Image (cartoon, grey):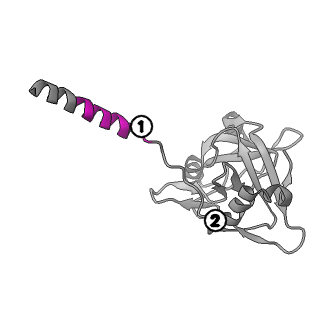
């Protein structure tokens, strides 16, 4: 009888440990009360992979790097999270699988450079951005967008909360308000 209880206890404990190890990371959705201005424009997109905290650059039609960011710890586009890590403050994960971004174009290419690595390197070297020669080999996605929508503000800028944009996506009005570019 003692052996059966021991075996049963061992199996139960093993299942508890396996179950605890299989918990998935919680997706960090954006705070729906955050307000975003449409000036000069905002984009909503889906990408091939998760690039939420990676550096992106633009590549011109002529094949040159453009839009190389100048992030440092004092930049308003960067925030320090609760773990003391530098993370971006210009992209927000929406509940629908889309990303809201106020700094993207169809010419973006994503690198494998994390925001933290970029900020640390800039701080250590006393510069605002990396030279082209360091960025080119780190580009991992030249055409990252599965879908890409844009809204500009031709007149007076409008403001939306992330919650309002989530609702637009859920109720279908999103595709009539944003212009589909891809």
Mark 2 neighbour class, 10 Å CA radius: few under 14, some 14 to 19, many 20 or more? few
Label 1 or label 2, whichever lies nearer to me, is: 1
Q: Residue at x 20, y 33 (%)?
A: 9
User: Which of the labelled discs sits on residue 66, or is there none?
Assistant: none
**Horizontal side of residue 62 vs 31, given as left or right:** right
Q: Whole-Å distance between the Cαs marked 1 and 2? A: 36 Å
Apparent side of residue 72 relative to residue 26 in the rendered image (left or right): right
46 in the magenta segment: no
Q: Earlier in the sequence, mark 1 or mark 2?
A: 1
- The magenta stretch spans residue 13: yes
Judge whether 2 appears above or below 125 on screen. above
Residue located 77% across and 37% down the image: 143
The residue that mark 1 highlights is 22
Residue 133, percent from left and from top: 71, 38
Q: Position of residue 169 (x, y in %)?
A: 73, 56
Q: Who is closer to the viewer here, 160 or 13?
A: 13
Mark 2, residue position: 76
Q: Residues within 10 Å of mark 1 (few under 14, many from 20)?
A: few
Quadrant in which residue 11 is drawn? top left
- On-image quarter of the C terminus: top right
**Figure quadrant of residue 36:** bottom right
Which percent across, then down, holds residue 66? 80, 48
Residue in the foreground of this view, choosing between 11 and 152: 11
Residue at image position (77%, 51%) is: 67
Is residue 50 found left or right of 46 in the rendered image? left
Main SS of residues in magenta: helix
Q: How many marks?
A: 2
Magenta residues, as a range? 10-23
- Residue furthest toward the left? 2
Placement of 54 over or under 138, stated as above or below: below
Describe the element under mark 1 as helix, strand or loop: loop
Query: Percent from the top left, x then y, of residue 145?
Result: 76, 42
């Amino acid at each position: 009888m003692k052996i059966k209880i021991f075996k049963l206890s061992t199996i139960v404990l093993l299942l508890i440990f396996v179950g605890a190890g299989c918990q998935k990371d919680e997706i960090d959705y954006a705070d729906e009360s955050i307000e975003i201005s449409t000036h000069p424009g905002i984009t909503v997109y889906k990408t091939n992979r998760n690039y939420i905290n990676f550096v992106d650059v633009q590549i011109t039609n002529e094949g040159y790097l453009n839009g190389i960011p100048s992030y440092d710890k004092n930049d308003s586009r960067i925030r320090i999270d609760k773990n003391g890590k530098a993370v971006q403050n210009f992209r927000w994960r929406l509940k629908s699988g889309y990303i809201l971004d106020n700094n993207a174009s169809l010419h973006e290419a994503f690198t494998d450079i994390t925001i933290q690595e970029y900020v640390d390197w800039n701080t250590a070297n006393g510069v605002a951005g990396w030279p082209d020669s360091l960025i080119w080999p780190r580009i991992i996605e030249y055409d990252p967008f599965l879908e890409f929508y844009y809204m500009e503000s031709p007149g007076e800028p409008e403001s939306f909360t992330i919650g309002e944009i989530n609702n637009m996506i859920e109720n279908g009005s999103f595709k009539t308000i944003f212009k589909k570019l891809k």
